[in-house]
Image (spheres, helix red, strand yellow):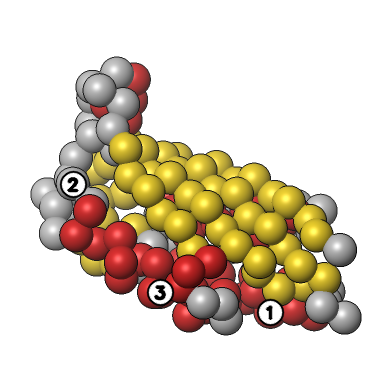
Amino acid sequence: MLRIGHGYDVHRLTEGRKLILGGVDIPFEKGLLGHSDADVLVHAVMDSILGALALGDIGKHFPDNDSAYENADSILLLEQVIKIANSKGFTVGNIDSTIICQTPKLAGYIGQMRENIALVCKTDIGNISIKATTEERLGFTGSGDGISAHAVCIMEKTK
């Protein structure tokens, strides 16, 4: 049995924060504003997994009014989502994702992002696709106000 899920996340760029995407600390003058580390890519991946299994979204599992998740490492939250999925008898089949931002350029970081997510999802790196695109200076991502990400996953029933 296969289940398909979609996830989307967006965060505003702001000064005084680190820019973390796919668990990678990317040198940049701004970072993403959020209760956790605001890793939009990992948040979209988590929502796609939870959505595939009809388990709600990350806000349900890691509420932004809970101090336990303040400045949380999203990779560690993804580990918890994978444990939940595994407990339901599902594993990641594959993930396809896209990060939307004007700057910084992300090509040099995508390999490490893929490795990080594959490791946590307990799958081969060949099952993790991450792309990055701009919006040709249109909208909030194009103007540099924020970064967004989409992710689609297939979850496979193993038990």
In-front residue for pair 12/16: 12
Q: Nearer the viewer, mark 1 or mark 2?
A: 2
- Identify the residue at image location x=56%, y=58%: 95
Q: Nearer the viewer, mark 3 or mark 1?
A: 3
- Residue 115 rendering spot, x and y as whole percentages: 39, 74
Q: Which residue is mark 3?
A: 116
- Identify the residue at image location x=79%, y=56%: 3
Q: Which mark is residue 117?
A: none
Residue 78 visible in this rendered orientation of the protein: yes
Q: Which quadrant would the C terminus be assigned to in this image?
A: bottom right
For mark 3, give the secondary structure.
Answer: helix
- Residue 120 rendering spot, x and y as whole percentages: 52, 78
Residue type at mark 1 is Lys
Q: Earlier in the sequence, mark 3 or mark 1?
A: 1
Q: Earlier in the sequence, mark 1 or mark 2?
A: 1
Q: Which residue is mark 2?
A: 105
- State whether residue 21 is above or below residue 156: above
- Residue 44 rendering spot, x and y as whole percentages: 53, 51
Residue type at mark 2 is Lys
In-front residue for pair 126/11: 126
Are circles 2 and 3 on residues that touch, CB within 8 Å? no
Residue type at mark 3 is Asn
For mark 1, give the secondary structure.
Answer: helix
| Residue 95 appears left or right of 30 | right
Q: Which residue is mark 1?
A: 83
Residue 69 visible in this rendered orientation of the protein: no
